[in-house]
Amino acid sequence: MASKRAPLTPDQIALSEARKAKRLKQEQTSASEKGDIIQRPWLKLQDSPGLNGARRVKIFTWNLLAQCLVRRELFPTSDCLKANQREHMLYRELLSQEADILCLQEVDRLEKLLPVLEKAGYSHRYASGPRKKHGCLIAFKKDTYEEVGLRLVHYDDEEIRSEGSDIARKGASFRTKNIGHIVALRNNKDDFGLVVATTHLFWHPRYTYERARQAGILKREVVKFREELGDWPCIISGDFNFAPDDAGYSLIAGDPLLPKQLEDIRMSQVVHATVDPTVTSDPIKQDENENEEETDPDRSITNARIATPTDGLLSSAELHDLFANSGPPLTSAYDIGMKKYVASDEMSKTPIKLFGDRSDIVSGRHGAHEPQWTSYTHYWKTVLDYIFVIDTPVIQSTVTGVLAPHQTEDLEPGLPRKGVCASDHVSLSAEVIFQVHQSTGIDE
């Protein structure tokens, strides 16, 4: 027969409750400590316009570093590569800016992420390339926006010319499985429409041509999509995998291509085995003085052959036309915003180093005011992430604030890093005000 346990005394009950409270506090403290990230100030660049009809949009973009891609050998200086070491930091940074719209790349572990977004008041739309274990996600505040349109762009399948063979019409140098993810959003309160796109372009540093091709296709498809909806303004943000001095950035920004950029395009006009399975596995030499870095498969072109006219790859002039034919150049929220900051009194009080401080960009060209870094690891230190805006003839944008860029000392010895950032990329956020251009005479 089971023995009856004597009832607890008031002192024992009090002691038990105290222990429970202590455990709960420890668990809360532990979760808070796991979620610590470096705090970055918000840079208010100007007061929001007080005109009637102005629409404020706060956008946030971040490559999360998919857990399925994490390898210790890629991040030898990181102290937080396990999922349970990173996730609380990821969630805190994602929600820290209370952005209206989130554009995320390298998203996996959706079963963990989506409940966090849902609890914070976001709806979402996720997409990935064929057989990829991670993808792109656009989230938006559901009490502000509703989704009214969707388009998924598979760069591998998009045509860039109307004549020739199937391969020539696509003009691709590599089948990369990368995508452009486009969502049309309408404001619940005033029917203001906005096209939002995010992407993760091909990563390989030598494939300048393919990244430029993908960026040009994305711009073309975003503009085509927005024209179907009524010529709405657009935001395109994500991981473009090129720096501000790259040919892809210059094409997006509308700058003429420099000799070095033209040469980078020429040297990357190749056809990979993913496009033509008959090619050999021999690497294509980048120059006569090939060194160890250039024989590294992550930094050199292998399993490819030099393109021929029948392959249909675009010339540099045709690449320019691909961008130019879809309308005016894109503008970068950070390049515009940080240029305002540099010209302000705040720059003398709190100096911030930018891309132009470590790289020579000719005066008059775009890109010098992008952040100094957006990706910083033991092996890779560069700028890859952007927030671009496309205005309309009627609706014009003004950048009124940005999240301060990280400084080098914050990021050493390399990301991801406990108490700093959970990804190998850093997040960007900007506030953009859209308003009807006064000279149009159109009622707001």
Image: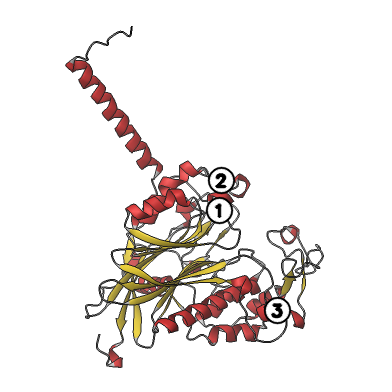
Q: Amino acid at mark 1?
A: Thr
Q: Is residue 85 above or below residue 345?
A: above
Quadrant location of the N terminus in the rendered image: top left
Quadrant location of the C terminus in the rendered image: bottom left
**Pair 3/1: label in front:** 3
Q: Is residue 189 above or below residue 441?
A: above
Cα distance, mark 2 to mark 3?
Answer: 45 Å
Residue appearing at x 64%, y 84% in the figure: 161
Give residue 327's mark.
none
For the residues labelled 1 and 2, say whether their Cβ atoms are less than 8 Å apart: yes
Label 2 Cα crowd, 10 Å radius (few <14 / some 14-19 / many 20+): some
**Circle 3 residue:** 166
Secondary structure of residue under mark 1: loop
Mark 1 vs mark 2: which is more N-terminal?
2
Mark 2 vs mark 3: which is more N-terminal?
2
Residue 173 % position (x, y): 69, 72
For the residues labelled 3 and 1, say whether their Cβ atoms are less than 8 Å apart: no
In the foreground, 214 or 244: 214
Residue 129 % position (x, y): 57, 63
**Circle 1 residue:** 377
Cα distance, mark 1 to mark 2?
Answer: 8 Å
Q: Position of 270 compared to 79: left or right?
A: right
Secondary structure of residue under mark 2: loop
Mark 3 vs mark 1: which is more N-terminal?
3
Label 1 Cα crowd, 10 Å radius (few <14 / some 14-19 / many 20+): many
Residue 357 can be seen, yes or no: no
